[in-house]
Amino acid sequence: MKICRFNDTRLGLVDSGRVYDVTSVLENLAPLRWPLPFGDPLIAQLDQLRPALEQAKLTAAGVPAGEVRFQSVISSASKILAAPANYRKHVEQDTKDPEVDAGVHSAMLKGVERPVDTYGLFLKASSSLVGPADGITIDWPGERRRVDHEVELAVVIGKVARHVPREQAFDYVAGYGLGLDITIRGAEERSFRKSADSFAVFGPWLSTPDELSDPNDTAFWLSVNGEIRQSSSTSAITVPIAELIELASNVYTLYPGDIIMTGTPEGVGPIRDGDIIRAGCDGIGEMELLVREA
């Protein structure tokens, strides 16, 4: 099942290039009262809602996916976590780029086989989360800085998780999407440079686990203005998905709708005002978005 939010407030299912409006099912969501719980209410109740979603699709009039605007179906993530330097070729490439390295990636290559073990995960502000229709807005104070794209497989947590062993990690996954971890290059703390508004893109929709034949061996890619920049597979990840979930849940309580960006492969490069980014992933789909300066 591929679940989307489109045209701002509509809930849909995507099938064979068409979007089916199942917004009526949202009436089944349990009402929330203050103080609100952590997590995304749709994702928290997704298992219970699935039969109603499938039933609503039977009577919905489908429209071509190209005629709607896709926002992030995750609207209330309590946090977005990301794995740094989780593809070896990416680390090796960055050591050759002084604008990116600043000595950090060079240090990672010296006796550090798995940088995540040493540096852990980092956080991106949940307020940075957008969907493909929203695009990326570059609005950084001061002098113009280099802004890079980083495409990754994004894992969405489906239920409250704490101290989850890696052997059970996939039991806590609601689904997958494409993630763009947009990055300002500079000396500031990583989470600061990566948390500006629109710097965390999730899309084009949420693909439930049955849509991916093997999340540990899934191909994905990114192009800018038609030029392929990044093309790899999750099989090249240094620290696999299950271990990332284990690590994250040993430090944080994970809530429904929390997103783990699993790392980006080689090919990271700059983006500028007017660029058109396209990204795709086997078992998920493709999305397109515009880069603009504020």
Image: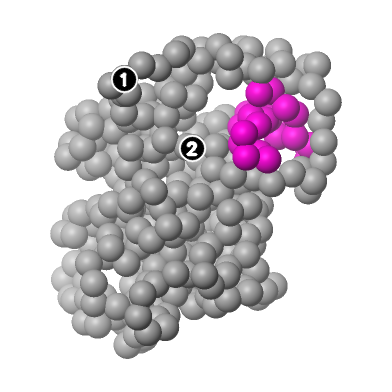
Q: Earlier in the sequence, mark 1 or mark 2?
A: 1
Q: Does 149 appear above or below 78?
A: below
Tell me what residue is drawn at x 66 percent, y 58 percent.
288
Q: Amino acid at mark 1?
A: Trp
**How far across and how far down the image is residue 24, in percent?**
66, 18
State the SS at label 2. Answer: loop
Q: Quadrant of residue 116?
A: bottom left
Task: Say whether residue 95 is left or right of residue 273.
Answer: left
> Disc number at residue 74?
2
Tell me what residue is drawn at x 22 percent, y 42 percent.
247
Which residue is at the front of the view, 293 or 260? 293
Which residue is at the front of the view, 290 or 169? 290
Does residue 186 appear in this view? yes
Residue 7 among magenta residues: yes
Task: Say whether residue 83 is left or right of residue 3.
Answer: left
Residue span colored magenta? 1-23
- What is the image's colouring? one colour
Tell me what residue is drawn at x 23 percent, y 62 percent.
115
Q: Quadrant of residue 77?
A: top left
Residue that numbered label 1 is attached to = 34
Q: Amino acid at mark 2?
A: Ile
